[in-house]
Image: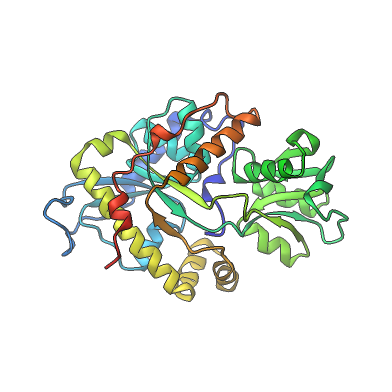
Amino acid sequence: MPFDPTTAFVSRSPFGIGRRSLLRGAAGACGALALGGLPAPSRAASGPTPETVLRIADYKALDGLALEASGQLPTPFRSQFAEFGSGNLIVEAINAGSIDVGSSSEIPPAFGIAAGARLSIVAVVKDDVNWQVVLVPPDSPIRSVADLKGKRVGYVRTTTTQYYLARMLGEVGLRFTDIQPIALTPAEGQAAFEQGALDAWAIYGYSVPFAIKKGARVLVTSNGYLSGNYLYLASPDALAEPGKAAAIGEYFLRLRRAFAWRAAHLERWAQVHSAAIGVSAEIDLEILRKNSRQRDLAPITDADVASAQNVADTFHELGVLPRRIDIAPAFDRRFNDILSRPLS
């Protein structure tokens, strides 16, 4: 995945803006985007029934589109997809009981747990990190991260950009306070960067190739700083219902097939995906081919737990996460067997 879709929504308090109205909207969207409902021949007798309803949080043109394009829909249960703009909102919806399952980067669950949200981490998406970078203008004298000291650096608050920027600075003996950090949305960052108001810009996704085509230079990528992990979250209440738990397992199996299809059909996926998000297929295919890895769904490992803990600790050290949390109890490995099986 060329960008982290969970970072599309940014606020100074990740769980404090318009919660009730947003959750009402999410619940309505779930009902409006119903898909599936027909039993599949491969459904095991102990699996979900056609009456089982699984409410799934998705992002624009992401997992739901991959399922459809790869022929993994309809599902042997009632799949209700709702589109979200951020992982923060998905965490809120899971905590409120409006959604059963959805994904985010490693960051929103940490803030959710710190705020007392009820959620379980049940699988790990392995994805690209090459398209999360620090950019500088083409004529910039900045040649290393150390050169960022005292400079105006744009980033997106409480996202992967803030995390990897902090790690990069720490590696060369600098702190966040040693730069002039400027929190901006991606759109604001693009405008500021193009107008010369930033000396550097930590950003992700399609903003990167567009900026490069206009002359921007990549100072450093996040490869080696980000894990590439994105976490699939589930409602503890959904996990407690046998039918919903079985549906989540079947959903994960179908996602794995969809991701394998994506990796094997990059040109076709670029055509479908680019049409859905409104970029050229050429740019989309360029990003897909240069990804550090293709999107995949994996079982939880001890290294994944350690990575999520490191992310939480980093945001606490930055003074953004209000208290230190132990994230390990939120991980639930009940689907590791399904996530480890050879695909058929």
- Determine which quarter of the picture holds residue 20: top left
In the image, 228: left or right of 101?
right
State the residue at coordinates (23%, 43%): 244
Residue 111 makes an appearance in the image: yes
In the image, 334: left or right of 266?
left
State the residue at coordinates (49%, 50%): 229
> Which residue reaches farthest left?
45
State the residue at coordinates (39%, 54%): 298
Which quarter shows the C terminus? bottom left
> Which residue reaches farthest front?
302
- Determine which quarter of the picture holds residue 90: top left
The percent coordinates of residue 286 (x first, y second) are 59, 71
In depth, the one of 166 and 25 nearer the eye is: 166
The percent coordinates of residue 261 (x first, y second) are 38, 69
The percent coordinates of residue 140 (x first, y second) are 86, 56
Residue 24 makes an appearance in the image: no
In depth, the one of 296 and 224 nearer the eye is: 224
